[in-house]
Image: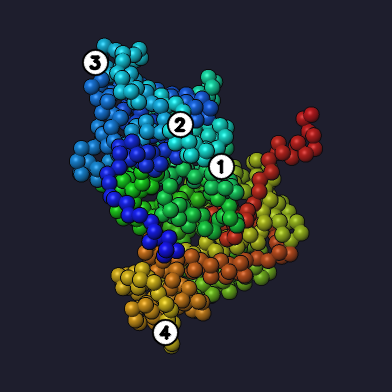
């Protein structure tokens, strides 16, 4: 090997020719025909277009034409438009640091022209006619077209045949082009888009309201199987829709995230969304969602990747927490839920079967502030583990030979109105099957409830509510746990010592390459303290460390809730079944158990009629 290296002749350093530089840039910007479509549509939108038309031949490999009705390019600026790093969108560093346009690098047209045949035709409102520029010859000729711009790209990668071999079939490339235009259409309902292939109209989205455009782009199924979300923090606003857990997919192919109108792929945002779905998704299912994040341009850096599909936030933890909170709030209210009363201690499980021993008999659910005699109010006065154990142990006692009143205390006008018209969302219980399922009748037809899964979620949510106020007490370790640490872990432990202490963790360097853990959260005693420390340090470096602790705590509470919930083969009275239904209606995320399995299903009257061929 050394002989081969020594035999290699020395090559002098030289400046690369412009064409080669542009071809290198094209390798970063132009991956396939869809990349060209994305860049050209970005330019059209920046030019103020209200109508954008894309025409393709051969899936975009043989020809791509993008036409718009934007402001157009002045004739004397057309040659400059094809120069590298020539743009009208920024002119100074402050403008670069607060970019509000889709494009800004000024290299897309030059890069595309270096690997394909490109012509550019444009006309401004004050011009007598349009002008057409041939990128290869530089010839400028008069042309006929209205105000706006047309860009024609032919024979992509003709000058770099090795790259053309990496393209897929025409149908595959066409699908990628459609998806690229779909991403633009979803975030710009004020613009009409059309895509033609081989002279046939393939997709068209006319100008519409944001709600109508979402239905047009993602279809009715997505809208009907998702919930709106909204969060306004002043400097950061999030809107969109989050798919229900039941609508989760095997692949992550319906996840759209936009930052200031720009489609992005961001691990931090994806992590925030996924963490919001943690205890409602089953297995490796992928949620569907469309998130629109608006943030001050100077708080996000879009100059991270040549394709502008990646961004960097000034305060990544703020964005992560906001995304998680917005999605969690959207998922919190179950399909059959009713609005909770303003006081969290009211309306949640009143008259229910998921209560502590003493109060349950009189129709008052056990909440952290109404705990069993002798336990007192445990918010902030008992450790999390002791309080959770107490609650989980008391819950089954509420079932012992007691008949629970099916009529809950009616705290809100909505409650009273539904009760007066027998319109409880989950209806009235009628029977129990195999000691597992509760059958109920509502206005839509038949409701089938898995009583253990439903009760498990109710107990779990109550334990989580108590967790908010419980302390994260630290438990010193008799023998500190040590582990070999990376430089990143040591730097994080030193910089975030105060945050670690608030989480009950004392982690400090023992040597330049070793960290020692001297205390851990008391609620997590008995676990793998080194694994916990590594997880917290890794997430604290990127996200919010408290999310690691919270997940670990929730796993404990989930196990407690599973053991504390009513078991299969338990015979319930009609009153107890109705009490379970009312508690479900007031419990967040009651559509799934803690493991992501459904807790209830609706069978409509139409579906029942179809089973028996009624109406045929």
Colour pattern = rainbow
Q: Is residue 559 left or right of residue 125?
A: right
Number of residues whose C-alpha sits closer than 10 Å to that of mark 3, classed few (under 14), some (14–19) or many (20 or more): few
Number of residues whose C-alpha sits closer than 10 Å to that of mark 2, classed few (under 14), some (14–19) or many (20 or more): some
Determine which residue is flagged by label 1.
Answer: 225
Per the rendering, the mark at residue 158 is 2
* Image location (x, y in percent) of residue 18: 30, 37
Identify the residue shown where x is 43% and y is 33%: 159
Front of the two marks 2 and 4: 2
Cα distance in 3D space between marks 3 and 1: 49 Å
Determine which residue is flagged by label 4.
Answer: 480
Per the rendering, the mark at residue 126 is 3
Residue 82 or 373: which is nearer the viewer? 82
- Tell me the SS state at disc 4: strand
Q: Is residue 355 above or below residue 407?
A: below
Mark 3 and mark 1 in contact? Answer it, CB < 8 Å: no
Cα distance in 3D space between marks 2 and 4: 64 Å
Front of the two marks 3 and 1: 3
């Amino acid at each position: 090997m050394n002989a081969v290296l020594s035999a290699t002749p020395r090559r002098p350093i030289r400046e690369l020719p412009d064409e080669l530089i542009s071809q290198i840039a094209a390798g970063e910007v132009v991956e396939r025909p869809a990349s060209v479509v994305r860049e050209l549509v970005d330019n059209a939108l920046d030019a103020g277009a209200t109508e954008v038309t894309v025409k393709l031949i051969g899936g975009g490999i043989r020809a791509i034409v993008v036409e718009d009705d934007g402001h157009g390019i002045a004739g004397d600026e057309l040659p400059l438009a094809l120069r590298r790093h020539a743009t009208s969108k920024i002119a100074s560093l402050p403008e670069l640091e607060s970019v509000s346009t889709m494009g800004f690098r000024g290299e897309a047209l030059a890069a595309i022209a270096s690997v394909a045949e490109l012509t550019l035709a444009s006309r401004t409102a004050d011009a007598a006619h349009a002008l057409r520029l041939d990128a290869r010859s530089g010839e400028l000729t008069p042309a006929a077209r209205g105000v706006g711009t047309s860009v024609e790209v032919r024979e992509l990668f003709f000058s770099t045949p090795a790259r053309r071999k990496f393209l897929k079939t025409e149908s595959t490339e066409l699908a990628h082009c459609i998806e690229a235009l779909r991403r633009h259409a979803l975030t710009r309902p004020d613009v009409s888009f059309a895509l033609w292939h081989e002279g046939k109209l393939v997709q068209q989205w006319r100008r519409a309201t944001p709600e109508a455009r979402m239905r047009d782009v993602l279809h009715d199924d997505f809208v009907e199987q998702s919930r709106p979300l909204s969060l306004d923090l002043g400097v950061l606003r999030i809107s969109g829709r989050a798919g229900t857990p039941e609508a989760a997919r095997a692949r992550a192919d319906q996840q759209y995230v936009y930052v200031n109108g720009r489609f992005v792929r961001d691990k931090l945002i994806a992590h925030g969304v996924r963490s919001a779905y943690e205890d409602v998704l089953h297995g490796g299912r992928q949620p569907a969602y469309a998130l629109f994040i608006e943030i001050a341009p100077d708080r996000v850096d879009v100059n991270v990747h040549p394709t502008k599909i990646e961004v960097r936030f000034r305060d990544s933890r703020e964005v992560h927490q906001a995304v998680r909170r917005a999605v969690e709030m959207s998922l919190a209210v179950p399909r059959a839920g009713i609005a909770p009363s303003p006081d969290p201690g009211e309306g949640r499980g009143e008259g229910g079967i998921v209560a502590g021993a003493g109060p349950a008999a009189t129709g008052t659910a056990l909440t952290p502030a109404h705990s069993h005699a002798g336990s007192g109010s445990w918010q902030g006065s008992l450790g999390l583990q002791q309080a959770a154990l107490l609650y989980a142990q008391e819950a089954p006692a509420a079932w012992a030979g007691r008949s629970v009143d099916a009529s809950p205390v009616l705290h809100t006008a909505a409650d009273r109105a539904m009760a007066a018209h027998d319109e409880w969302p989950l209806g009235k219980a009628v029977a129990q099957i195999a000691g597992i399922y509760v059958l109920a009748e509502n206005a839509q037809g038949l409701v089938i409830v898995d009583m253990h899964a439903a009760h498990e979620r109710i107990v779990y949510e109550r334990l989580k509510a108590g967790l908010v106020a419980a302390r994260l007490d630290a438990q010193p370790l008799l023998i500190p746990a040590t582990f070999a640490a990376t430089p990143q872990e040591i730097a994080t432990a030193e910089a975030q010592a105060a945050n670690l202490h608030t989480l009950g963790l004392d982690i400090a360097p023992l040597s330049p390459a070793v960290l020692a853990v001297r205390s851990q959260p008391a609620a997590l005693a008995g676990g793998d303290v080194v694994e916990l420390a590594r997880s917290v340090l890794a997430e604290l470096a990127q996200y919010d460390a408290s999310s690691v602790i919270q997940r670990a705590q929730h796993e404990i509470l989930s196990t407690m809730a599973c053991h504390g919930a009513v078991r299969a083969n338990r015979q319930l009275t009609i009153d107890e079944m109705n009490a379970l239904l009312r508690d479900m209606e007031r419990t967040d995320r009651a559509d799934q158990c803690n493991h992501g399995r459904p807790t209830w299903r609706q069978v409509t009257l139409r579906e029942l009629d179809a089973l028996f061929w009624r109406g045929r």
